[in-house]
Image (tube, grey):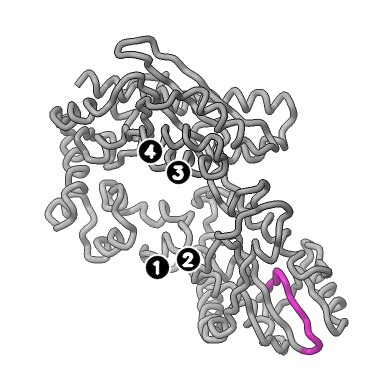
Amino acid sequence: MNLSKSKYINGVQCSKILWLDENNPEVKEEVSNSSLDTGTKVGILAKDLFGEHINIEYNDNLNIMIEDTKKALLQKEIIITEASFVYNNNFCSIDILKKNNNTFEIYEVKSSTDINDIYLDDISYQLYVLNKLGYNVTNTYIVHLNSNYTRNGNLELDKLFTICDVTKEALDRQNKVDETINNINKIMKSNQEPNIDIGIHCTKPYDCPYFKYCTKNIKEDNVFKLRGMNNTTKFKLYKEGIYTYKELLSSNINDKYKQQIEYELHDKEDYINKEKIIKFISTLTYPLYFLDFETYQEAIPMYDSIRPYMQIPFQYSLHYYEKDNGPLLHKEFLGEASTDPRRLLAESLVKDIPENVCVLAYNMMFEKMVIKNLASIYPDLSHHLMNIYHNMHDLMVPFKNRDYYAKDMHGSYSIKYVLPALFPNDPSLDYHNLNLIHNGSEAMNTFANLSSYSKEEQEEIRKCLLKYCELDTYAMVKIFDKLKEI
């Protein structure tokens, strides 16, 4: 097979992925490309890490890239980005290749903040190709983002990136590379689909786009529908032959999983611990505010006081009751495209939420983290922000503790499961009825790229962002009102 780095990595995870890609691609499920886009941006930035360099431009004809690389390598000392090589149909483009007279160093750039084991397989494959071609590679390095770097002023590439020597690990994997390539070629020659059963490799290091296809013959009510159970335990139970709901009920799994199974198998009525819910409600006071933030992340910090992948709040929705049984009121904030939204958001927040009032969030640790970060960078607003922080309560508690549990929650206490379980036939609470923005990921990705749209498109997107975030806090209000009824 004509292997690239990405195909080789798929083959390391499961060679069946490659066979299905070639022979049955229509059963493949779509996966998000946001991480791929991030990796591309980080890779482009890292090309300037060592200063002046020659970049091998991408060409559909890989032979042109290979020939351009050979010409560049005629120089004694040079840094080449996207240097391209092929050995026995095994092709690779190296992110950064450093030539020192007759020796070479390989640098593989990753957009993560640490080293994943699969990255070592990636760079080991590149080392394998160059070694087979007779190049003397003395060192191999993984270049990844430094999670401790905080931008202040101009971006400092030498501090943004961490360079780790993984030469020993790459050398130790050379036999594995040879075996993997041989195994891939053997499987690809067959007309028969590989007989590879599901296992932890279906989710590690990446979620396989063929998992639904590979589990099509497993009875629908099975261990993979259980919420909260880790994948290692799920596959262990599957290997032991304990994976249908009926089998799981007789096993020694946690009672919370058995509760999910029993409710779904027997269509049981909602479980409500009235005493615990009354106790929770009694901790809340008026005025009562319902707060939800939307944030986005940047691998490359664009503004001061930001670290790689730090949550940057750009929007909030705020519903509130001034008094019990009073009218429901609403306020909101949405930042502007291509600007740092944090200062204006923080100022708006302290204006909209008075001190010493009760603030409800759903999974409040997220909202508290956002507020604490804002307080740390804006000392003049810190006292008020931390007052909000210390007066927060979590609407998720009754559902996390299963003081209220319904069959349609499917073992989850996420608001996206709790809401339709409590209000199954209310179109005003159905996120699917929203336009453009239906979940947090869509909100995050859309705002991060807002400046790339036309003025008219931006106006429409902003309306959709506001509607989405408003529904988040309105949903909290409805859930709170439901608990009050109880």
For disc 4, the marked residue is 364
Tag 1, which secondary structure? Answer: loop
Spatial CA distance of label 4 from label 3 is 8 Å
Callout 4, which amino acid?
Met
For disc 2, the marked residue is 16
- Mark 3 residue crowding within 10 angstroms, few (<14) / some (14–19) / many (20+): few
Spatial CA distance of label 1 from label 3 is 43 Å
Q: Residue at x 52, y 78 (%)?
A: 180
Tell me where the magenta segment starts and ends, as one range.
Answer: 91-102
Name above or below for residue 302 compared with residue 76.
above
Q: Nearer the viewer, residue 241 or 50?
A: 50
- Mark 1 residue crowding within 10 angstroms, few (<14) / some (14–19) / many (20+): few
Spatial CA distance of label 1 from label 4 is 43 Å
Q: Residue at x 30, y 53 (%)?
A: 218
For disc 3, the marked residue is 369
N-terminal of the pair, mark 1 or mark 4, is 1
